[in-house]
Image (cartoon, rainbow, N blue to C red):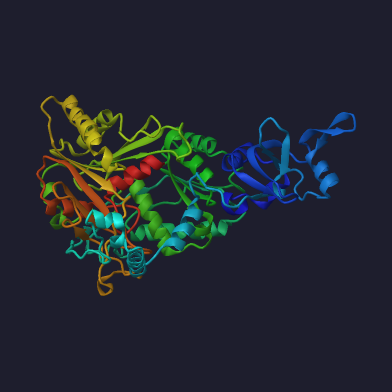
Amino acid sequence: MKENMNFREEEFEEILKPNRRRKLQKELNKMKIQVTHTPRKYTVVGVTELGADKQTFPLRKGQENIDCTVQKYFYENYRIRLKYPHLNCLHAGPVHKNIYLPIECCRIAKGQKVMKKLSDDETKNFIRKTATSPSQRLGKIKNIVHDQNFSADPLMRSLQFSVSDQPMDLDGRVLPPPTLKMNKNLNPRDGEWDARNYSFHKCAQLNCWVVVNYHAASVSPENVREFLELLEKIGRQRGMTITKPVENLSFRDSSSVDPEELFKELKQKYPKIQMIILIIQKFKEFYGKVKKAGDRTVGIITQCVTDGNVKNVKPVIVGNLLLKINAKLGGINTILDVDSRPVVFEHPIMIMGADVNHAPASDTVTPSLAAVVATRDVFASKYSIEVRHQTSRRDIIVELKEMTQNLLRAFYRTTGRKPEKIVMYRDGVSESEFQKVLSEELIAMRQACTALEENYTPAMTFVVVQKRHHTRLFCDESEGRGRSRNIPPGTTVDTVITHPSERDFYLSSHLGIQGTSRPTHYHVLWDDNDLSMNVLQSLTYAMCYLYSRCTRSVSIPTPTYYAHLGAYR
């Protein structure tokens, strides 16, 4: 509980608060546990509202039933003196039976298949332990193919099939990185660039803002002061105007004050408030509360910083934080230099990204979330977003027509022009759904245009973005980049391993930091912009350099990345 769910030791001394109890129940529901006092295993069906010292169950003594507490029962029958008698108990199945177990006497049973989504720390550890360098991965693949000897299989031989034990050699090319512009031009190298001596292209002003320290038990006022001084100092270096916060609040922990109530008070007190910066623990549930209150309920921009980053503040952390703050306040971090813009930018163009997020596989009730993002300026650096709920596990975006209409209006309000070209990068579509997506979503986009103006028919390009595939590209180690010696950013392949008649290509636009880079597969479903493969690849690669949260190119185009974040938010 402490390691994976961020429970604190002092919480075990009393009954869990309702929200914490619900979280524990959600995590443990239907999970098998092994008790420490007997060899038995149980299935968890709930968490009691009372602690072991007050939770009772009917116990037969002689000819009558008496109400016995869990604490008393464990002492009298197993001589176990509970360390946390006030802590809630686990209710074990079946539901109609009164089986209550002290949490301290339970362990997670081994060998269970986990259907729930892994936590951030679990995911990080999983990736770290399974990451394999390109040379090691290629060696393992060769060994597997050699050991299996597929060509000797009788069925394969009867069909006159053979499988080579060597990987396929093919020619690719490395696209040149685009020149970026902040206050002056800069040239990325190996998919990254240093922004320390540059100012943002368009700098935001932060004049009315509040700092809320939700973990004052760990983060001292001195820590906060040093953090804010460095934030203001580096903000000036980046060209931003950051004044002193109008208020600096501190609470002992995240349970002290509800974010929604606090945000309403601050909004009423400071009607022109621009942002609230919150210092919090790395606690996903509370982070979700903050974002829900800020984004949906009150309408205030929020920026969270973990307590560890405030206590051990470093210029690089603050620099990365300012990338997000400037973008959230309407600033523009970087744009493509005029000479690096693909030819499609000669006309008004709106570049879109779309994704649909589903609940975990075990959840068939929670609605899916569809997010569509589109550029709304001539630099393709500012975005509008539309998010909708839809039927659980449905991949087609149901309300795409209305969402596209709103995005077109936003583009027109900002630029004063209607886009003559539209390029859609659609994530989350499998090959079996290509025709369905094309027939429904492309038509919805067309209808959105004609609904706004009868004869408005901009040229459209519809590209599916796929990351879930098993294709890997390797290069000579001498040509590799980074510590892992992965293929260089910009590596493109559009022959041999691509479709014989349809238009598709592989592009690895980012620098692989650990493990083996997975190239992104782009499949062109429709293109009446008549873009050549060179232009489409250059546009796609350039759009991977405009992600505002870091000074690196990312693995998919920025609109698609933002749609992914919007759907998962």
Query: Left or right: where does residue 369 sit relative to residue 248?
Result: left
Q: Identify the residue at the far right of this view.
A: 62
Q: Does residue 334 show up? A: no
List x then y, in percent, for residue 238. 33, 58
Relative to 15, is 4 above or below?
Answer: below
Task: Locate residue 168, reporting x and y percent.
Answer: 22, 63
Residue visible at 66% across and 36% down? 93
**Nearer the observer, 57 or 458:** 57
> Residue 490, image x and y in percent?
22, 60
Along the line of sight, which residue is nearer the eye, 356 or 499? Answer: 499
Work out whether residue 44 or residue 320 is closer to the camera in this orientation and state it. Answer: 44
Q: Please report the residue visible at 56 percent of the width from the left and 38 percent of the height from the top.
A: 258
- Is 427 placed left or right of 110 in the picture? left
| Residue 153, image x, y percentages | 31, 59
Residue 181 or 28: which is nearer the viewer?
Answer: 28
Q: For residue 475, what is the image quadrant?
A: bottom left
| Farthest bottom residue in view | 478
Count of labels in the image: 0
At 24% across and 58% down in the image, what residue appears?
A: 183
Quarter of the figure with the C terminus = top left
Residue drawn at x 57%, y 43% as measured from the top left? 27
Q: Is residue 492 visible?
A: yes
Instruction: Locate residue 102: give its quadrant.
Output: top right
